[in-house]
Image (cartoon, coloured by chain):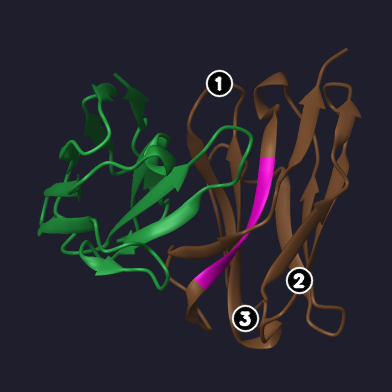
Chain colours: A brown, B green
């Protein structure tokens, strides 16, 4: 059974940093592209960042480019999102998601974690 | 960025009703359209990908159609467990973008 478990969320002041982790199990992590998607309270969904199976290719939304970095450790079956220079508008539930298509993926998220809440506030 | 517009934003329906949700892309996305279902306090769940392919385990009362810029999600006979919010998402090009959601409520 596919399982994705996010951790690392919490309350942080504007300008601060957080690192989210997503522990994956139940599938071959090393051949799977992965993504982070966020959802602001009471609002819709926003794709944040994606990474290919090897980590060789990454893509990020303009709203986080230069501040957030997606990475992965295939030896630990873990996905990361390093978030720097956080802003109030980054407050959201952050979901880790597995891509349906192997290797480079393609934006079709077939499994999602339960999410971790990030609150940016002074 | 490709804008995704869903309609209606909410719909009230009864068990057994046929429900149709539409999604329009601001430019041609071929068949790179995905539908998700989300229930309160839960993560989204993949229903349909590439416009019309039903994800494994999803009931056959769900169907999707369309290509280019106009897409439809249909629930043929609404069941109690289908009351939720539905999102479309384009998977044609980065940045992937979502519709604003359609809430299916009990009439």
Query: Neighbour class for label 1 at 10 Å: few (<14), some, many (≥20)?
Result: few
**Both labels 3 and 2 in a single chain:** yes
**Both labels 2 and 1 in a single chain:** yes
**Both labels 3 and 1 in a single chain:** yes
The quadrant of the rendering that contains the C terminus of chain A is top right
- Identify the residue position indicated by label 2 in the image: A24
Name the secondary structure under disc 1.
loop
Identity of the residue drawn at 71% across and 45% down: A115
* Left or right relative to A82: residue B58: left
Mark whose residue sits in front, 3 or 1: 1
The quadrant of the rendering that contains the N terminus of chain A is bottom right
Residue B14 % position (x, y): 25, 28
Name the secondary structure under disc 3.
loop
- What chain does badge 2 belong to? A
Is B68 above or below relative to A11? below
Residue A76 % position (x, y): 87, 79
Residue situated in front as seen by the camera: B92 or B103: B103
Q: Which mark is residue A53?
A: 3
Q: CA distance from mark 3 to mark 2?
A: 13 Å
Magenta range is A94-99
- What chain does badge 1 belong to? A
Name the secondary structure under disc 2.
strand
User: Which callout, 3 or 1, points at the residue further toward the start of the chain?
Assistant: 1
- Identify the residue position indicated by label 1 in the image: A42
Identity of the residue drawn at 84% across and 40% down: A9
Which quadrant holds residue B12?
top left
């Amino acid at each position: 059974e596919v399982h994705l478990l996010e951790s690392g969320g919490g309350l942080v002041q504007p300008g601060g940093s957080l690192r989210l982790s997503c522990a994956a199990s139940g599938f071959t992590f090393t051949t799977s592209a992965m993504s982070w998607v966020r959802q602001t309270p009471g609002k819709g969904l926003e794709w944040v960042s994606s990474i290919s199976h090897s980590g060789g290719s990454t893509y990020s939304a303009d709203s986080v480019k230069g501040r957030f970095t997606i990475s992965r450790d295939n030896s630990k079956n873990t996905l990361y999102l390093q978030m720097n220079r956080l802003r109030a508008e980054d407050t959201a539930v952050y979901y880790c998601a597995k891509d349906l298509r192997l290797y480079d993926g393609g934006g079709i998220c077939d499994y999602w974690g339960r999410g971790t809440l990030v609150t940016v506030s002074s | 960025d490709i804008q995704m517009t869903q309609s209606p934003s909410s719909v009230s329906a009864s068990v057994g009703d046929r429900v149709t949700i539409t999604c329009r892309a601001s430019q041609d996305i071929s068949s790179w359209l995905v539908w998700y279902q989300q229930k309160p306090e839960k993560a989204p769940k993949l229903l349909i990908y590439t416009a019309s392919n039903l994800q494994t385990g999803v009931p056959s009362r769900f169907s999707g159609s369309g290509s280019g810029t106009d897409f439809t999600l249909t629930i043929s006979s609404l069941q109690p467990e289908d009351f939720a919010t539905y999102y479309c998402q384009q998977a044609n090009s980065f940045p992937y973008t979502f519709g604003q959601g359609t809430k299916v409520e009990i009439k």
